[in-house]
Structures are given as structure tokens and as C-alpha cells.
Image (tube, helix red, strand yellow):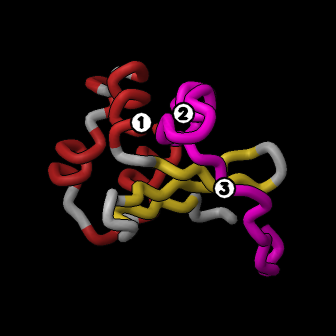
Amino acid sequence: MDGNLTPISAWRDGSGYGDPSHAEADAQATLSVFLAAVTETASAHYSAEQIAAWARPDERDINQWNSARKLLNTFVATIGDEVAGFSDVGDDGYIETTLPLWNW
């Protein structure tokens, strides 16, 4: 990125309330965003042991991740055709998790 702000071009509802195929199609990308957030973006704030316990990349199952995204009412932010981050929104409308890709 060149220092300019890139606007999010779309929010896709991956919760199953809209088109449930979005969550499955975006599962790998949102998992990659999560792992990058834990192991890169936030790594300066945690010990290696904490990062390993939180990330657990070898233990992540894409089907379980996808199921969790559906249950957590996940909205996927895209820039063009690329996933730029995601947010989990509670039933009360409050954002519970927001994970953007740092390089946007």
C-alpha cells in the first residue's frame, strides 16, 4: 500500500443470514487474516508462547473455522475481490471481533 487509504468496497454477510456460500468461500481467507493478525500484527505485544497458544495454525480445521464464522455472524470486508478483514457481530448488533489485514 502506498500510504493512501483504500476504501472497503464491500461487506459480505457470511453468517448464513444472507448467502451462506460467502462464509465457505471466504473461510480460508478469513483464517489467513486471523493467523496474520496473531502472528504478525500483534506479535510485538505477546510472547512467542502466547502467540503459539492463540494461533495454533496446525490445529485449525477449515470446516470448523467456517462453522464458527457462520455462528458468529461474520461479515467479510473486501477490497476489489480480495478479503481485507472481517468482523464478528453479536446478536445485539455490537462488534465482537474486528480483524483487518495490516497491509491495507
> Within the image, what quadrant is residue 103 found in?
bottom right
- Residue 17's x, y, as percent? 51, 40
The C terminus appears in which quarter of the rendering?
Answer: bottom right
Disc 2 from disc 3: Cα separation: 12 Å
User: How many C-alpha atoms fall within 10 Å of the one at disc 1: few (<14), some, or many (≥20)?
Assistant: many
Q: Which residue is labeled 3 in the image?
A: 11
Q: Residue at x 34, y 69 (%)?
A: 44
Q: Amino acid type of disc 2?
A: Ala
Is residue 24 shown above or below 43? above
Judging by the rendered image, the residue that carries numbered circle 1 is 70
Query: Bounds of the magenta span?
Result: 1-30
Q: Amino acid at mark 3?
A: Trp
- Taking the spot 42% from the left edge, 44% from the top edge, the residue there is 35
Q: Is residue 11 above or below residue 16?
A: below
Label 3 close to label 1 by CB (< 8 Å): no
Question: Which label belongs to residue 23?
Answer: 2
Label 3 residue SS: strand
Residue 28 seen in render:
no
Q: Residue shown at 54%/61% (left/top)?
A: 100
Relative to residue 8, is residue 12 drawn left or right? left
Regarding residue 9, the answer to whether it shows in the image is yes
Question: Which sits in the foreground, 44 or 96?
Answer: 96
Q: Are marks 1 and 2 in contact (CB under 8 Å)?
A: yes
